[in-house]
Image (cartoon, grey):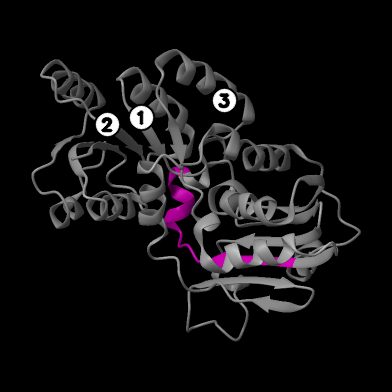
Amino acid sequence: MTSFALIGAAGYIAPRHMQAIKAVGGDLKVAYDPNDSVGVIDSHFPQAHFFTEFERFDRHVDKLHRRGEDIDYVSVCSPNYLHDAHIRFGLRAGCNVICEKPLVLNPWNIDGLAEIEQHTGRKINTILQLRLHPAIQALKERIAQSNERHAVDLTYITSRGRWYFASWKGDDSKSGGVATNIGVHFFDMLAYVFGPLQSQTASLREPERAGGLLSYEKADVRWFLSVDANDLPDAVKGKKTTYRSITLDGEEVEFSDGFTDLHTRSYQEILAGRGYGLEDVRFCVEVVSEFRRAPIVANGERHPFIDKYLKG
């Protein structure tokens, strides 16, 4: 049976990792989080050891190693800015690693991890679940069979309350900002479907929302991301808290469903030796890192949701 340790057990995304571990027949041996609101573990692995101090967690993992009960994978679900440190812990503990997106905040962090990965002989895997979505795979196949250039609009609004900005997620130095925190996997998906990036323009960068223009080999993409419920289209306000939309040459690409089991699919691929590694994730990390530093361009082509903010 494949054994796991989990870092960030009280986080938003941790239950999906617990479900995936259970679904692939794994065993969660030990978990860590400074917050002790982790009762969800009882629904999956009630016998897992749990620690609120990293030093005690580290000691327990080492004790298992000395007993010959090595952990096969460390799953990292901690805040974004801690990912690279916790990945290094997993590698040095002799484990392979599965890390939530974004893998790291800046591309130079990838270079450092590559050195440790080579030194330890262990593998870093990341979650790029949209590559496994049936609708996205079908879109990729469709684009691959055409030499046309396309016009794409990507819109993703996922409502968050005031707590969001009081947490680490509201601190750009820790989360990377809204484009990184909720958008990095979309940028990965766009390159996966439309080919290498040619240019990037930043149109809007605020704590609650961001937008810009990305030109790929086969598409020009106007994008808008937001955590503000006020940005939801009138047709869904009061009915839904999340809105996802991709249009291709004015035609809606249906991908609103099919998200529930993508973490399990990701774990299945990783355990089968087909996980996505450091170089797979480099491009989308470069995009969000560059976006945080890019000058805002208030004219030219842009997503229609951006207009009202540029007009004040």
Chain-order first, disc 2 or disc 1: 2
Q: Residue furthest top?
A: 119
Amino acid marked by disc 1: Asn
Per the rendering, the mark at residue 72 is: 2
What residue did someone put label 3 on? 109
Q: Residue at x 50, y 37 (%)?
A: 103
Circle 2 crowding by C-alpha within 10 Å: few under 14, some 14–19, many from 20: some
124 falls in the magenta region: no
**Quadrant where the image shows the C terminus:** bottom right
The residues bearing labels 2 and 3 have C-alpha atoms spaced at a distance of 23 Å
Q: Please name whichever residue, 6 or 216, is drawn nearer the observer in this view of the structure.
A: 216
Residue 204 coordinates in the image, percent (x, y) = 75, 54
- Range of the magenta residues? 153-168
Chain-order first, disc 1 or disc 3: 1
Residue 135 coordinates in the image, percent (x, y) = 57, 69
60 left or right, relative to 17: left
Quarter-of-image position of residue 154: bottom right
Q: Residue at x 90, y 58 (%)?
A: 299
